[in-house]
């Protein structure tokens, strides 16, 4: 009986914690990170300020948890999807496509926060370093012919172009079609690496298939085909 009570208590605590994170995310999107206080977050989550501090010692810690818990499931999904194809362009395409679509759709509100709020430098730097570390590991696995020096150049140009496009998309400067933006970036980066056109086509097909089979909330197939047609010109 004690064991069951402990299990139930853990579930209750986890649900309370997730409710706080969800409420904070909505509040940040509506009011802005800087303007929202811990008391505002407690009120939005329908909990006490004491309970909020039980889970998160300060607002930056809460934001860090929000970023991590949004990122880690995506990385796990990428790893699983990429393992179904051989190392090389297809794995790179799957990783880039899934991460970009997530950033341009589900996590678009977080991107806006980074753009408009000027989050604490420590938070921003940590998020960037973790992203680059993950991307570096993917490149090492799929681009074994590159030296360490050249790999860092690839990392910088690939991530830089992707981030800039994501920022402009979040501002509404690149239209409203995340599929077209994500696919263009994947194709552009693979082409810059010298991947042959036929390999790029196969890699993109694998990426689109991985996203659909993974349950990502994409538009109907006809809209996907239309977006791909626009990308190819």
Image (tube, grey):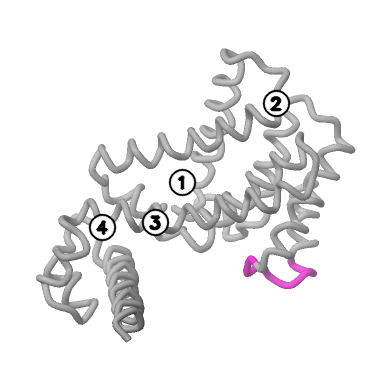
In front of the other: 36 or 74: 74
Q: Which residue is label 2 attached to?
A: 143
Q: Which residues are magenta?
A: 216-223
Mark 1, residues whose alpha carbon is within 10 Å: few (<14), some, or many (≥20)?
A: many
Percent x, y of residue 144: 70, 22
Q: Secondary structure at mark 1?
A: helix
Q: Mark 3 or mark 2: which comes first in sequence? A: 3
Outermost residue toward the front in this view? 1
Observer-side mark, 3 or 2, equals 2
Q: Which residue is label 1 attached to?
A: 167
Give how far apart the Cα atoms at labels 1 and 3 are. Answer: 11 Å
Give how far apart the Cα atoms at labels 1 and 4 are. Answer: 23 Å
Give how far apart the Cα atoms at labels 3 and 2 are. Answer: 30 Å
Q: Which residue is label 3 attached to?
A: 110
- Residue 96, compared with residue 217, is above or below; it is above
Mark 3, residues whose alpha carbon is within 10 Å: few (<14), some, or many (≥20)?
A: some
Percent x, y of residue 116: 31, 50
Q: Secondary structure at mark 2?
A: loop
Percent x, y of residue 230: 76, 53
Give how far apart the Cα atoms at labels 1 and 2 are. Answer: 27 Å
Give how far apart the Cα atoms at labels 3 and 4 are. Answer: 13 Å
In front of the other: 195 or 74: 74
Q: Which residue is label 4 attached to?
A: 62
Please tell me whether residue 220 belongs to the stretch shown in magenta.
yes
Q: Mark 1 or mark 4: which comes first in sequence? A: 4
In front of the other: 216 or 2: 2
Mark 2, residues whose alpha carbon is within 10 Å: few (<14), some, or many (≥20)?
A: some
Residue 38 lies left or right of residue 207; in this view the side is left
Q: Main secondary structure of the magenta part?
A: loop
Residue 85 lies left or right of residue 186; in this view the side is right
């Amino acid at each position: 009986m004690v064991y069951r009570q402990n299990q139930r208590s853990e579930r209750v605590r986890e649900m309370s914690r997730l409710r706080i994170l969800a409420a904070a995310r909505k509040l940040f999107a509506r009011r802005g990170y800087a303007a929202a206080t811990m008391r505002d977050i407690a009120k939005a989550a329908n909990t006490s300020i004491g309970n909020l501090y039980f889970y998160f010692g300060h607002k930056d810690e809460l934001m860090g948890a929000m970023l991590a818990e949004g990122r880690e499931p995506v990385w796990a999904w990428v790893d699983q999807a990429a393992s179904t194809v051989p190392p090389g362009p297809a794995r790179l395409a799957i990783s880039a496509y899934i991460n970009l679509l997530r950033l341009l759709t589900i996590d678009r509100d977080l991107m806006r926060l980074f753009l408009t709020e000027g989050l604490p430098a420590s938070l921003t730097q940590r998020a960037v370093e973790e992203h680059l570390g993950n991307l570096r590991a993917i490149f090492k696995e799929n681009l074994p012919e590159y030296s360490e020096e050249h790999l860092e150049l690839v990392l910088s140009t690939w991530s830089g172009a992707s981030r800039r496009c994501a920022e402009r998309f979040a501002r509404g400067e690149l239209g409203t079609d995340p599929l077209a933006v994500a696919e263009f970036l994947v194709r552009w980066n693979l082409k810059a690496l010298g991947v042959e056109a036929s390999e790029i086509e196969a890699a993109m097909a694998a990426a689109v298939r991985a996203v659909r089979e993974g349950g990502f909330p994409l538009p109907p197939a006809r809209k996907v085909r239309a977006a791909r047609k626009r990308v190819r010109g």
